[in-house]
Amino acid sequence: MNHAQLTHLGRALRLLGEHGEALTADTPDAKLHEVKADLRRALELLDESVTAAAPATRCAEHPGGPVDKAAPDLCLLCETRRRAARRAEFNGPAPHSSSPAAAIPSRYGTRADRPQPQQRWLPELWNGQEWQLCGTPRRDRREAELYLAALRRGSRPAMAYRLVHEFTDYEVLRIWGTPVRTDIEPLGNL
């Protein structure tokens, strides 16, 4: 757009703004026809000044590139780059293989695609009635044992502690102390 086109277009748009401010409910039809003519003139000036096609995407790098409706900027090229970066962030870089069978993904996935079974160690304490969780479950057995050792050395240790291994099922690994059931009612419920 050259300077003369820019000047004419700016003048036409300012005139339309003045028309918009002057509009009321009782504006005569002659005035509306004048606004219509000024609108057409502004559109013609705009058509003359625009030389390139309208951008298909909102991407500054690829305005005429392929469109991806799911992308925030509608740009398929940039969204493909972002998706590859997210995949690499979680899975590491893609392996490069020369065999054609490796390039075809399995419909059921591979062993590495399935989640690994989770195992945790649960520190528990005996509260006189039942075993209760006394800390957050740990992923490391040594860390869980150190946590229980610190609780036993603390100022108010429980009667007994135990470490439970959780893997598809529960297994009691170790018990410190002797759990004795205590009656919560005074005088034994007399």
Image (cartoon, rainbow, N blue to C red):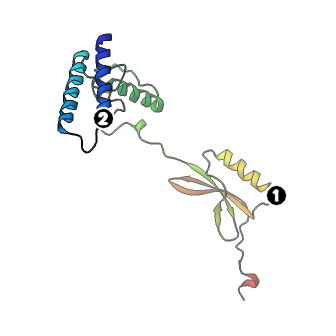
Q: Secondary structure at mark 1?
A: loop
Quick one: which residue is furthest to the bottom in this view? 190
Q: Is residue 158 left or right of residue 99?
A: right
Of labels 2 and 1, the one closer to you: 2
Identify the residue shown where x is 52% and y is 47%: 118
Residue 120, numbered label: none
Q: In x, y percent, where is residue 176? A: 73, 59
Q: Is residue 69 visible?
A: no
Q: Quadrant of residue 109?
A: top left
Q: Tell me the CA gap for discs 2 and 1.
A: 79 Å
Identify the residue shown where x is 42% and y is 31%: 87
Disc on the earlier residue, 2 or 1: 2
Q: Quadrant of the N terminus?
A: top left
Q: How many marks?
A: 2
Identify the residue shown where x is 24% and y is 40%: 27
Q: In x, y percent, where is residue 18? A: 32, 30
Q: In x, y percent, where is residue 59? A: 35, 24
Residue count near mark 1 (Cα–Cα under 10 Å), binned few <14, some 14–19, many ≥20 = few
Residue 20, numbered label: 2
Task: Tell me the amino acid under the disc marked 1.
Answer: Ser
Query: Does 125 sit above or below residue 182?
Result: above
Mark 1, residue position:
155
Q: Quadrant of residue 62?
A: top left
Query: Does 81 sit above or below residue 133?
Result: above
Q: Is residue 136 visible?
A: yes
Q: Secondary structure at mark 2?
A: helix
Task: Tell me the amino acid under the disc marked 2.
Answer: Gly
Q: Quadrant of residue 130?
A: bottom right
In the image, 145 versus 14, the foreground residue is: 14
Q: In x, y percent, where is residue 80? A: 35, 26
